[in-house]
């Protein structure tokens, strides 16, 4: 198998063509393909500081950016530029160094003829067979309308492509087409618009807002930052932050940013584009709470507590929790003036290792509300249930995309671990629970996902919290 062959199926290709094939046929970014199949499943790390090294075209640099200067000292074959052979020498003491100037230059006074110019231009232009092969590489996405014989430039000429999904005409250069450029109607570049909306909204709360900051966790960029609160927001578009992305995205990229912020004394809040489109009020309420500006503030002692019905539970969590409702054994709510302003639900733990415990399935407050002591008050009912049903404790999780779960710590929980990085599948517009593509009928999860035309998008995982009862 040649170096230009796909190591999974043997498809002959190279460069961007190979990267596009890997993404479309196998659902992998070129970077992940490189890690799995060329580097034995382990991403190379800098030998000096153990930080991940930079990925470049099916290979990784030997050193991280901070220590890249070391590569130049080692010489070309060992990871850097070889020392110049003529260093310290001149044409006067080394005959290998030639000097041409003026009439001594063999090309002095000469110009390309029109025939030569035409020949050079033709040599740089793809022949019709190579051109057709590049069109065919994305046949599932686009039909080309521009006749092959009219092609003349890879970078400056706009060719006409028609999206096979929506039928929209998409003018693109061949270079953009090869690099994975998408249909503007099916995959509009909404990230900037949404980021502006979020930044403007946070600014309307009375905070100074910065965009695209590269100083807080240099050289990484943060989309939106609020220096006064040391709070930052990342807006993650489903296509560009998934394994669909032509530039590739690593499994731990979102968590890496979260931890880099924590190490710098900042907190980071991740928003997926579908969450902003469908649940912006919940997102706004969560951010207001973290910035300490919730619209309505109540004390739990001023609220009554009662068991709520299945219908009430569903309605409340679907309107108040970022993940919506979940089936439960029991649920209770805090009520003020006839309105449920906070609620908690419990269920049997999904994992066998937590047998004998009860799991908090959902806890949320009504959007726009901050209930002081709300979780603590509702936890008393959960603990009463545990005692009556001979449970030895309570388990719950906090999603690291949104914070560190310190509310549970204040309520007497101890952090006992984490789940590892989680993921969903996406078609570029929506997210699907990974269990939708659970292996069945002899087909693996990966195979079912590829057949469905979806790719993975990664989260940050969750902390695991345990409260043991005496």
Image (cartoon, rainbow, N blue to C red):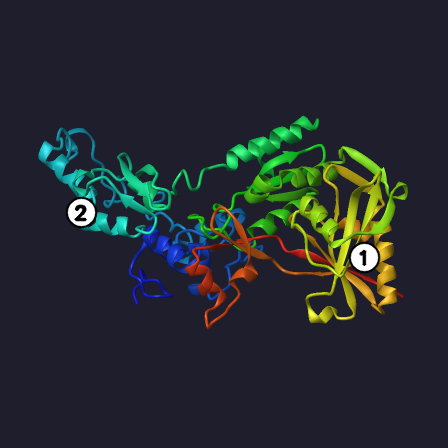
Q: Position of residue 326 (x, y in %)?
A: 68, 56
Task: Bin the neighbour count of mark 2 within 10 Å (Cα to Cα): few under 14, some 14-19, many 20 and up.
Answer: some
Dot 1 falls on a residue whose secondary structure is loop
Instruction: Say which quadrant the C terminus sits in.
Output: bottom right
Depicted 203 relative to depicted 33: above or below: above
Between discs 1 and 2, the one toward the N terminus? 2
264 displayed left or right of 211: right
Whole-percent x, y for residue 267 in the image: 68, 43
Q: Secondary structure at mark 2?
A: loop
Quarter of the image with the N terminus in it: bottom left
What residue is rendered at 74% in x and 68% in y?
A: 354
In-front residue for pair 346/136: 346
Q: Nearer the viewer, residue 85 or 238?
A: 238
Q: Quadrant of residue 348?
A: bottom right
| For discs 1 and 2, the disc positioned in front in the rendered view | 1
Residue bearing mark 1: 413
The structure residue drawn at horizontal position 71% and vertical position 71%, both measured from the top left corner, is 353
- Location of residue 421 in the rendering, given as x and y in whole percent from the top left corner: 60, 57
In-front residue for pair 60/294: 294
User: Which dot marks residue 238?
Assistant: none
Left or right placement of residue 347 versus residue 192 in this view: right
Near mark 1 (Cα within 10 A), the count class, few <14, some 14-19 or many ≥20, is many
Label tally: 2
Residue 420 location (% of width, % of height): 63, 60
Q: Distance of mark 1 from mark 2, alpha carbons?
A: 67 Å
Which quadrant of the view contains residue 150? top left
In the picture of the structure, the residue carrying the numbered disc 2 is 127
Q: Is residue 36 visible?
A: no
Of residue 231 and residue 168, the one placed in the foreground of this image is: 168
Establish if 451 lies above or below 273.
below
């Amino acid at each position: 198998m040649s170096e230009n062959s796909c190591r999974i199926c043997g498809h002959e290709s190279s460069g961007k063509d190979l990267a596009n094939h890997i993404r479309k046929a196998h659902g992998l970014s070129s970077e992940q393909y490189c890690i799995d199949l060329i580097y034995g499943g382990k991403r190379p790390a800098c030998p000096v500081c153990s930080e991940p090294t930079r990925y470049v075209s099916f290979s990784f640099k030997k050193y991280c950016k901070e220590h890249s200067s070391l590569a130049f000292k080692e010489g070309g074959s060992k990871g850097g530029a070889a020392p110049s052979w003529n260093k310290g020498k001149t044409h006067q003491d080394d005959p290998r160094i030639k000097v041409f100037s003026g009439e001594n230059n063999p090309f002095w006074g000469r110009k390309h003829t029109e025939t030569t110019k035409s020949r050079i231009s033709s040599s740089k232009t793809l022949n019709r067979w190579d051109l057709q092969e590049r069109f065919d590489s994305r046949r599932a996405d686009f039909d080309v309308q521009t006749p092959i014989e009219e092609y003349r430039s890879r970078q400056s000429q706009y060719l006409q492509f028609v999206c096979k999904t929506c039928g929209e005409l998409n003018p693109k250069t061949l270079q953009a087409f090869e690099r994975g450029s998408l249909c503007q109607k099916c995959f509009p570049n909404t990230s900037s618009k949404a980021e502006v909306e979020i930044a403007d909204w946070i600014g309307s709360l009375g905070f100074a807002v910065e965009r695209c900051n590269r100083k807080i966790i240099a050289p990484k960029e943060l989309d939106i930052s609020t220096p006064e609160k040391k709070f930052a927001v990342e807006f993650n578009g489903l296509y560009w932050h998934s394994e669909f992305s032509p530039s590739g995205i690593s499994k731990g990229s979102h968590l890496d940013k979260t931890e880099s912020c924590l190490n710098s004394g900042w907190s980071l809040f991740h928003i997926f584009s579908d969450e902003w489109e469908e649940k912006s009020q919940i997102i706004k309420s969560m951010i207001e709470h973290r910035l300490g500006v919730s619209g309505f503030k109540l004390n739990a002692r001023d609220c009554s507590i009662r068991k709520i019905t299945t219908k009430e539970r569903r309605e409340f969590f679907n309107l108040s929790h970022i993940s919506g409702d979940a089936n439960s054994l029991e649920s209770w709510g805090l009520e003020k003036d006839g309105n449920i302003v906070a609620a908690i639900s419990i269920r049997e733990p999904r994992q066998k290792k937590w047998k004998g415990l009860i799991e908090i399935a959902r806890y949320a407050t009504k959007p726009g509300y901050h209930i002081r002591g709300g979780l603590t008050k509702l936890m008393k009912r959960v603990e009463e249930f545990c005692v009556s049903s001979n449970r030895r404790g309570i388990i719950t999780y906090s999603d690291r995309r949104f914070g560190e779960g310190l509310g549970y710590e204040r309520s007497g929980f101890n952090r006992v671990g984490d789940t590892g990085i989680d993921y969903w599948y996406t078609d570029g517009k929506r997210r699907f629970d990974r269990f939708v593509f659970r292996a069945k009928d002899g087909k693996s999860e990966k195979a079912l996902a590829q057949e469905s035309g979806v790719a993975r998008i990664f989260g940050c995982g969750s902390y695991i919290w345990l409260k043991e009862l005496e």
